[in-house]
Image (spheres, grey):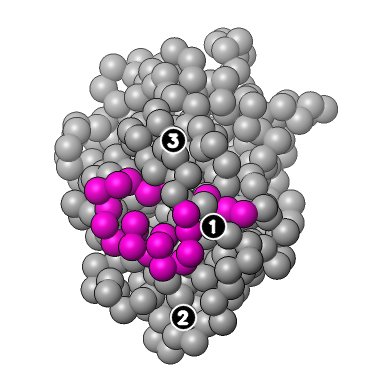
Amino acid sequence: MSEMIHTRRLILRRPAPCDWEAARAFSMSERSAGLGGPHTLGKSWRTFASELGHWEIFGYGMWAVTLRGEDTAIGLVGPWTPPDWPETEIGWMILADDLEGTGIATEAAKAAITHAWDVLKWDTIVNYIAPGNTRSIRLAEKLGAVLDPDAPQPKPDEHTLVYRHTKPEAEA
Amino acid sequence: MIPVLIPVLTTDRLTLRAPRIEDFAAYAGFRASPRTVTVGGPFNEREAFQQLCAILGHWHLRGFGRWMIADRDTDAPMGIVGLYYPEGWPEPELAWSVFDGAEGKGIAYEAALAARAHAYDALHMPPLASLVDPSNARSVALARRMGCTPEGTYDHPDHGTLHIWRHSKEERPS
């Protein structure tokens, strides 16, 4: 399975131990508030380990997003697929704090979504977003996803917004 | 990137191998049980999934880690054993747990011996520690059975005071 995606400005690659520092800085800061943060060092490390492990288990997972010509992870975007979740999710964490307005997150997420349709052959793609995570909601809407109030919920203990993407028509 | 090769160990009754998604139901069941209270549990499925993935990622980050203990004949998952060294841990720990139904059969002992031998023979590690909650009588008994000696306590930021049991390098049951 492919372990790299190239876009106009970005390279998405399998995350590696060298991405720990970027992941740690994000996870332990207020910027992870939309994901329940800031987290402790131990929790941050275990979460990062799980990103690496997801690839080991499934052969795919969240991509480390890097700018072409640099190898620092500025985001993590892509599949996160616990077996008990009702649908296949594309999630994201924007690690760098200066991407607002650059369209980088959109470009990365679009590439991950296209890969999920075309390579992973997914039938559905949703984004699970905590209510109040306005940055993620904006990104989902920018990507053309639509809030689906009737979608099955992934987390029994908390309400989650489900943004649904529409599968493009198969091209001949 | 080259995937980490997680070695497979075999004992009389067991295979120690990389966890797989097929193990998730058994693993999540254990993590949801009251037996994980001493390590911050019980955990829901979302947390258990992340923890299972993190077991694999630990191998990438450290070059060693924990295995799924599986029945050597049926491959059924029975527990987790191996070296655990996340951020916040004082040193690499030889950690073990067996799922409900696999207790009381010497499974953890057999698996932990194999994991410890691997740590010494393949990784050349110094005498290992196991961190045990003093209320966990089964683990205390296993530490003693493995020849460990008590060596004070470690105040874990999340799990409270844990007792350090030090493994010897000399004592090697055959």
Name the side, left or right, on which A76 lies relative to A86.
right
Q: Secondary structure at mark 1?
A: loop
User: Which marked residue is nearer to the observer: mark 2 or mark 1?
Assistant: 1
Residue, disc 1: B167
Q: Nearer the viewer, residue A143 or B113?
A: B113
The correct choice, above or below, for B101 with respect to B29 in the image is below
Give the magenta part as a residue range: B127-149
Query: Which amino acid is tagged 1?
Result: His
Q: Nearer the viewer, residue A122 or A133?
A: A133
Q: Secondary structure at mark 2?
A: strand
Could you tell me how far apart the alpha carbons at marks 2 and 3 are, in whole angstroms? 31 Å
Same chain for mark 2 and mark 1? The answer is yes
Query: Which amino acid is tagged 2?
Result: Leu
Quadrant of the rendering where the C terminus of chain B is positioned: bottom right
Q: Given contact means CB atoms under 8 Å apart, are the residues at marks 2 and 1 in contact?
A: no
Label number found at residue B154: 3
- Tell which subunit mark 3 falls on: B
Residue situated furthest right in the rendering: A69
- Tell which subunit mark 1 falls on: B
Q: Earlier in the sequence, mark 2 or mark 1?
A: 2
Q: Nearer the viewer, residue B149 or B115?
A: B149
Q: Residues within 10 Å of mark 1 (few under 14, many from 20)?
A: many
Name the side, left or right, on which A148 lies relative to B131.
left
The correct choice, above or below, for B30 with respect to A5 in the image is below
Could you tell me how far apart the alpha carbons at marks 2 and 1 are, in whole angstroms? 22 Å
Percent position of residue A109, x then y: 54, 33
At 36% from the left and 76% from the top, the residue drawn is: B106
At 70% from the left and 35% from the top, the residue drawn is: A18
